[in-house]
Amino acid sequence: MIRVFRTDSETVEIPSDAIFKITNIALIITSENSLNKAAKIYGGMAKKIKSRNGSDIAGISEIINLHFFIGEEGEEKEGLTARAYCMQEEAAASETLSVNGIKLLSIDVKRYKKLSEDYFIKKLFRYDFIVFFLAAGASVRIIAPFLKDKFSDPGVITIDEAGKFVVSLLSGHIGGANKFAEEIAGYIGNGAIPVITTATDATENFSLDMFAERFGLFIEDGKSKIKIFNKASVCGEELRIYIDEDIIFSIKEIESYIKEFKNAKQIILTQGLNASNLGLGAKKAAVVSLKENLKNIAESENIVLLRPRCLTLGIGCNRNTLFEEIEDFISSVFKENNLSLKAIRNIATINLKRNEAGLLEFGYKYGNFIDFYDKDEINAFMDSNKNEKNNKKDLNLNKDTRRSASFKYTGAYSVCEPCAQMSAKNGAKLLIPKQKKGNVTAAAAASAAAAMISYFNRKGVQ
């Protein structure tokens, strides 16, 4: 199988279903001191990976790419560049930073002409994080013209020349800058202080967006609800969290997470939804559910819906099927099954669809990545996972299967159902069995929600 991620700048193919995230970090190197700090950041990350061994390292679900940007002007920059290239080669040669041939941590050295060039700054905004080794004011002036909102801006961190203060400057929660600033301070050492100024962090109170980041949840109407709920948390209001019974979550894990906050006693956790506990009056309530028909209750500013990104969607389609046909069909199927499209984690299909434009557009719009399986993987999976409906010893001997359109055109017994289940893993059950309309087939399975929490556990709500 091949797992394909698409970022603003590139498409990345990973031959593994263990990787759930690729994080690209831009570090702006301006001096010998800043390169030394960047080296410590790399060293800290490398040590963290190397400390895990055997089967543990296979549990790391994130690839981290460090991009060292160094200016082209000045003799000093040439020396910095030469040293940075040595670090790049060292990282590339390290076998302990790889698992099954996949490089988990890398360094890529890049050059730029002027830090003030619009083209260059726009390019930086494609990265998940930007780390400046500059004064906070200088960093603000550089990025200010390009800022959009907390849901799309990268996490921005600035570190002073001495490496004493690591400031989370932008996108502290959703962009992950707060947590990353704390990590960086630890890597730099020598008393480096992470500077976090967001209200919930400063007061050590619960925040809605960090809760969503921790447990892989999409926040409906997040732009307004995050402000409302975080303000309520800081002001000491009671907050209720309802976990729908259709969600596979460890309640003990959530309880343990909540206990970390000063206002833990004001956070009431309940499993299950019913008519009485949804009549919530003026109390703030966060409802964790896959159900689409709950959207009407979230019209109240006191209620927010959180969608677990835990559904894998298997899709099959005829050649040249348009994006609009796929989107319309999937939307209707999810509505009929009372499931939110915001709960889709990823799309899965047969590798013959690697260049199917409409399917790719749908997959990258609604999912975090796309899994592609070849026909032999699909058939082997179906042969080893027989059910009462099909209990043949070898599905390949089933005449009806050989006559199917799927087998005729792809060589696979089926596409959407097995692809959804294989991508979800762990014996996942189908929530939506095969549905067909026009040129499209679809099926959905549920993955374990915890699988979406990255090892480094930074970037959150999308």
Image (cartoon, grey):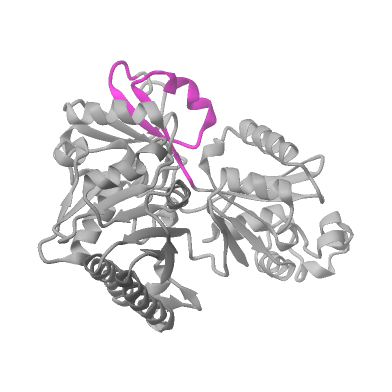
| Residue 304 visible in the shown view | no
The x and y percentages for residue 362 are 65, 44
The x and y percentages for residue 194 are 17, 53
**Above or below, comparing residue 158 to residue 327 in the picture:** below
Residue at the limit of the structure toward the left, as seen here: 191
Q: Residue at x 46, y 53 (%)?
A: 448
Q: Residue at x 18, y 38 (%)?
A: 205
| Residue 268 visible in the shown view | yes
Q: Quadrant of the N terminus?
A: bottom right
Of 359 and 453, the residue lying toward us: 359
Is 303 inside the magenta-drawn segment? yes
The x and y percentages for residue 277 are 35, 24
39 lies left or right of 70:
left
270 lies left or right of 354:
left
Of 365 and 35, the residue lying toward us: 35
Span shown in magenta = 280-309
Q: Residue at x 49, y 37 (%)?
A: 290
